[in-house]
Amino acid sequence: MQRLALRWRRAGLRVGFVPTMGSLHDGHLSLVRRARRAVGPQGKVVLSVYVNPTQFGPHEDFTKYPRNLARDVVRCRRAGVDVVFAPANSGMYPHPSGTGFSTYVVEERLSQRMEGASRPMHFRGVTTVVAKLFNIVQPAVAVFGAKDFQQAAVVRRMVRDLNFPVRVIVSPTVREADGLALSSRNQYLAGDLRRQAAVLSQAIGRARQAASSGGGRLRAAGLKRDLQAFIERQPDARVDYIEFFDPETLHPVREVRRGTHLALAVWVGTTRLIDNATLK
Ligand code: AMP
């Protein structure tokens, strides 16, 4: 992949890159379209499929994470992807516990709260694998989804701090008709859990309404309690975190106002779902 990317670079071809963990859905494909738009018809669009072990905690769903490379390749071909890069673990992390792999990339500020607090080491895995993928794929542009807002912010910071010559584009969240953000993990939601999962986007709608009707000052703590109770009215939904924060610094805010960002993580049965939005 790197040899091909360097050849493209010498030929003056721009690469648009979409990193994924596969099990592709329309959210991923919207990133492919965005990448194509960024590099043009002459450019190359690369999509990686790699379920990165270093971003999963020891008790998380790494082994059961849905994988379907054959179907992903068909979807990519139809969407106009030029290359699907699907490396093996042995290539990415040779002998990690022995003499092989021992260098990690750590962002130390934006990755502390929310996903970083709930999933220790998660962002270390993300920044490390994204740095590796950038070096392998040599993209001019990389497209990430707003669905993983904190991830996009952490990657953007890494790119700036470490001078990667990559433009990071964040593309909007694609949703189902009932508002549920598309996610490969939605496949875990059997029976009534799928219906209950709509509560994340409903909670965002409720927060937006409160923010727009609440006048100038609305206490974040009170709104959090209200949203938690609202979410947990669903029999199988349990809040992991709800956070109101400044979208630039990711610092939590005490008062919710226009432009405040909301992110939440909710267990629906044994599936952990995340969502976020700006409160307009
Ligand atoms: P994943 O395969 O879950 O690691 O996601 C790969 C990329 O797709 C990330 O940049 C995600 O933010 C993005 N993505 C996942 N779900 C969606 C969605 N519903 N809408 C837009 N982008 C998404």
Image (cartoon, helix red, strand yellow):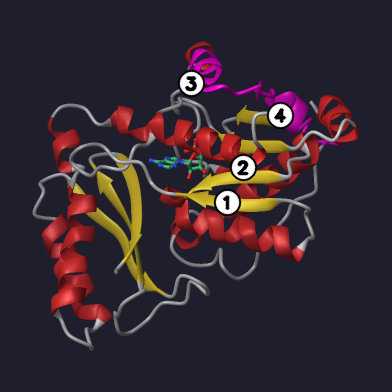
Foreground mark, 4 or 1, reads 4
Question: Mark 1 Cα within 10 Å, few/some/many (few <14, many 20+)?
Answer: some
Earlier residue among tags 4 and 3: 4
**Furthest-front residue in view?**
41
**Furthest-bottom residue in view?**
217
Q: Nearer the viewer, residue 79 or 21?
A: 79
Residue identified by numbered label 2: 38
Q: Nearer the viewer, residue 126 or 276?
A: 276
Foreground mark, 3 or 2, reads 2
| C-alpha span from label 4 to label 2 | 11 Å
Residue 205 position, x and y percent, is: 19, 59
Residue identified by numbered label 1: 169
Where disc 4 sits, the SS reads loop
Q: Are marks 4 and 3 in contact (CB under 8 Å)?
A: no
Residue identified by numbered label 4: 42
Earlier residue among tags 4 and 1: 4
Q: What amino acid is labelled 3 in the image?
A: Arg
Q: Are marks 4 and 2 in contact (CB under 8 Å)?
A: no
Q: The magenta stretch spans which residues?
A: 72-100
**Is 255 on the left or on the right of 237, as rendered?**
right
